[in-house]
């Protein structure tokens, strides 16, 4: 008898059957099943047909747990032991029907829990895969759109410098605003990806708060001058103008909030009120309240407006909410360690209240005196590596008759550039992060390890539509001097060049 199952066996029935090596029944107490003398054990149930061939060579106990033996008159769940002894075999049937039937729901529950656990793990992996695909898609989309967008904005900037009549000039202004809006949307999409991946770069630089507010006021006053909306900006006297923080992110937050207010206000007023709510000599919290008399938001939708792509549809023609814009507002505000709150009443307008902590900039910088020169402008030669004819044309026109004295030459790939560098001296080399014949990092290494000191120490400017932080860091760590993200203006390009070769 099984000593390990002693407790359970005490409450179970046991049938003992004596058989020979052919499976013929010699004796049976028929405690569970009727097994006539001289019958084969396979007559009771087909299960035993697979066991009979094993019996002649049986030396040790053979055990089969949890066997469902179902006959015409009886159905039981049993454990089966075959025990060889003195040329005979003892077949023991242990009836554990009640035990297995009672434990079955527990096993089933355990299986369900296990399935749920594995399902959760699978869904997590699926979510991570989707997130990786989304970020990869955004990175590729960002790069592919920024390059042609840079050309589009660049040629429009050049067109603006030509003689245009009034209608042409007004048309160009609309095109430039549309192009700039596309750039902002690209920045928004990229920022969402950066924030979710935890790679958003927050700067801490000097800036003038008054300049940001004034530029925003001028922009929206011009953009929506046809709307019957009064736009006022009020700055309390206690607000310090010179601060330390990230002006680009602050401008992006306020721009999106104001854009949202103008989109949702057909007539009435929009106001931006700025004041300091907590200030000492070195730090300050700035509260910015943007209110409008627009359509407002239902109370049950207020908690949803900061979700990605959320839009409140009043009717098919007037979707309210900025989608990406308000999502960016919330995420960027939190990245700046600030807070944003919304109160709104449907039909009466909305109020967004933001609070940002900044360092206060004290003292002033000494003004540098620049000695008068001779009036002779020394030309500075720049080698640009570019294989696309449209980009080459844009560069040629940008540098044509420039006041800085920059003279450019073109190379179609890295190999061509190295040939030109062997025979000519340049003050700077400029190329993008994706070249036709080698990776940007490889080309940078080739320049920095060049035998000529003139080449190895040349300033390197990378101008690229690949604006992810890790991609920028990769070329900078390889030895690039600066990184300029596309699209850029002529002024931004020249300022960057001036810093590198002055």
Image (tube, rainbow, N blue to C red):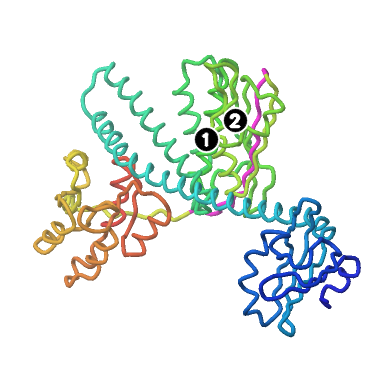
Vertical comparison of 320 with 466: above or below = above
- The residue lying toward the viewer, choosing from 315 and 486, is 315
The main secondary structure of the magenta stretch is: strand
- The residue lying toward the viewer, choosing from 194 and 154, is 194
Q: Is 61 on the left-hand or right-hand side of 272?
A: right
**Residue lying at 18% horizontally and 57% vertically, measured from the top left:** 414
Residue 82 x/y as whole percent: 72, 74
- The residue lying toward the viewer, choosing from 494 and 472, is 472
> Which quarter of the figure has residue 426?
bottom left
- Image quarter where the C terminus lies is bottom left
Residue 349 x/y as whole percent: 65, 22
Residue to which mark 1 is pinned: 324
Q: Is 18 on the left-hand or right-hand side of 303?
A: right
Vertical comparison of 422 with 235: above or below = below
Residue to which mark 2 is pinned: 272
Vertical comparison of 451 with 109: above or below = below
Q: Secondary structure at mark 1?
A: helix
Which span of residues is magenta-colored?
347-364
> In the orientation shown, which residue stands out farthest toward the right?
11
Residue 357 x/y as whole percent: 62, 48
**Residue lying at 63% horizontally and 54% vertically, measured from the top left:** 118
Vertical comparison of 374 with 263: above or below = below
Q: Is 320 on the left-hand or right-hand side of 351?
A: left
């Amino acid at each position: 008898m099984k000593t390990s199952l002693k407790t359970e066996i005490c409450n179970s029935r046991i049938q003992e059957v004596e058989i020979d090596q052919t499976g013929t029944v010699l004796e049976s107490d028929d405690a569970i099943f009727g097994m006539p003398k001289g019958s084969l054990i396979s007559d009771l149930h087909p299960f035993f047909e697979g066991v009979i061939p094993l019996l002649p060579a049986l030396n040790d106990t053979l055990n089969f747990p949890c066997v469902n033996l179902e006959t015409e008159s009886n159905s039981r769940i049993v454990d089966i032991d075959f025990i060889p002894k003195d040329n005979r075999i003892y077949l023991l049937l242990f009836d554990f029907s009640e035990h297995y039937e009672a434990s079955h729901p527990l096993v089933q529950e355990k299986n369900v829990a296990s399935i749920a656990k594995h399902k959760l793990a699978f869904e997590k992996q699926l979510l991570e895969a989707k997130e990786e695909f989304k970020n990869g898609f955004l990175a590729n989309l960002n790069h592919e759109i920024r390059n042609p967008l840079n050309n589009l904005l660049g040629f429009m900037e050049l067109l603006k410098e030509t003689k245009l009549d009034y209608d042409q000039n007004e048309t160009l202004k609309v095109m430039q605003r549309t192009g700039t809006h596309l750039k902002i949307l690209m920045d928004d999409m990229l920022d969402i990806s950066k924030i979710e991946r935890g790679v958003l770069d927050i700067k801490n630089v000097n800036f003038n708060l008054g300049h940001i507010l004034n530029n925003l006021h001028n922009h929206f006053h011009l953009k929506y001058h046809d709307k019957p909306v009064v736009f006022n900006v009020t700055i309390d006297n206690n607000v310090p103008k010179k601060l330390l923080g990230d002006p680009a992110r602050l401008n992006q937050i306020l721009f999106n909030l104001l854009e949202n207010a103008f989109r949702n206000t057909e007539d009435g007023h929009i106001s931006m009120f700025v004041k300091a709510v907590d200030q000492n000599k070195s730090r300050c919290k700035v509260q910015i309240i943007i209110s409008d008399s627009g359509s407002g938001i239902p109370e049950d939708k207020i908690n949803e407006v900061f979700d990605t792509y959320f839009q409140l549809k009043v009717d098919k023609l007037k979707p309210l909410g900025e989608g990406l814009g308000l999502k960016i507002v919330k995420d960027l505000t939190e990245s700046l360690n600030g807070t944003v709150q919304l109160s709104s009443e449907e039909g009466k307008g909305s109020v967004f209240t933001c609070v940002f902590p900044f360092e206060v900039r004290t003292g002033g910088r000494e003004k540098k005196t620049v000695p008068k020169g001779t009036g002779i402008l020394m030309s500075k030669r720049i080698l640009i590596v570019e294989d696309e004819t449209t980009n080459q044309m844009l560069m040629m026109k940008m540098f044509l008759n420039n006041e800085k004295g920059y003279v450019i030459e073109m190379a179609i790939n890295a190999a061509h550039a190295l040939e030109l560098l062997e025979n000519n001296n340049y003050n700077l080399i400029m190329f993008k992060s994706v070249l036709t014949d080698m990776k940007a990092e490889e080309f940078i290494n080739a320049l920095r390890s060049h035998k000529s000191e003139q080449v190895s120490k040349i300033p390197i400017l990378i101008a690229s539509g690949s604006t992810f932080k890790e991609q920028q860091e990769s070329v900078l760590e390889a030895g690039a001097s600066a990184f300029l993200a596309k699209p850029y203006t002529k002024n931004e390009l020249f300022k960057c060049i001036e810093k590198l070769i002055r």
